[in-house]
Image (cartoon, rainbow, N blue to C red):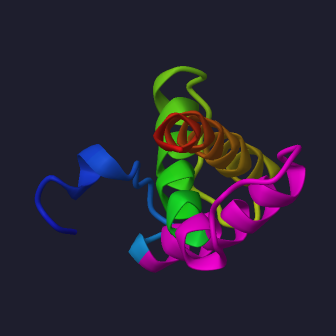
Amino acid sequence: MLPGFRLLVPYHGDMGFFGWIILGLIAGGIAKAIMPGKQAVGCLPTLILGVVGGVLGGWIGSAVFHVSIDRFWSLNTWALAVLGSVIVLFIWGLVSRNRR
């Protein structure tokens, strides 16, 4: 594992770097479908924001809720990744709305 990477992505054994990227990509798509209204974000930025949201959700799960997020197919992992992605998309919507 890369030095300092542990601070960004909670790693507990099963899910590595690429697992978090795949999870974040899918969670970003789910979050965009959940968010009401139109976001001024294309597909690629949504997926990138989803990866950031997946990392945020993983951090929230391990730091705040003390939930183990080490399994790719765990409902906890997916719920936290989607939650993090929704939070990131919401913040992005607020920031991008002010730019118009």
The total number of labels drawn is: 0
Which residue shows up at 45% across the image and 62% down it?
13
Seen as rendered, the residue at the extreme top is: 64
Q: Position of residue 79 (x, y in %)?
A: 77, 46
Instruction: Name the foreground residue: 68 vs 8.
Output: 8
**Where does the image place residue 97, in percent across and percent down from the top left?**
59, 39
- Residue depicted at 66% across the width and 66% down the height: 72
Q: Main secondary structure of the magenta part?
A: helix
**x and y percentages locating residue 63 in the rendered image:** 46, 26
Point out the stretch of residues depicted in magenta. 18-46
Q: Which residue is rendered at x = 53% and y = 59% of the image? A: 49
User: Image quadrant for the C terminus?
Assistant: top right
- Judged left or right of residue 31, residue 1 is left
Asked if residue 25 is positioned above or below residue 93 in the image, the reply reads: below
Residue at coordinates 53% horizontally, 31% vertically from top-left? 60
Residue 74: x and y in percent read 76, 56
Q: Compare residues 89 and 1 and report the one nearer the observer.
A: 89
Quarter of the image for residue 28 reads: bottom right
Q: Quadrant of the N terminus?
A: bottom left
Asked if the magenta segment contains residue 4, the reply would be: no
Compared with 33, 7 (above or below) is above
Q: What is the residue that sits farthest to the front in this orientation? A: 100
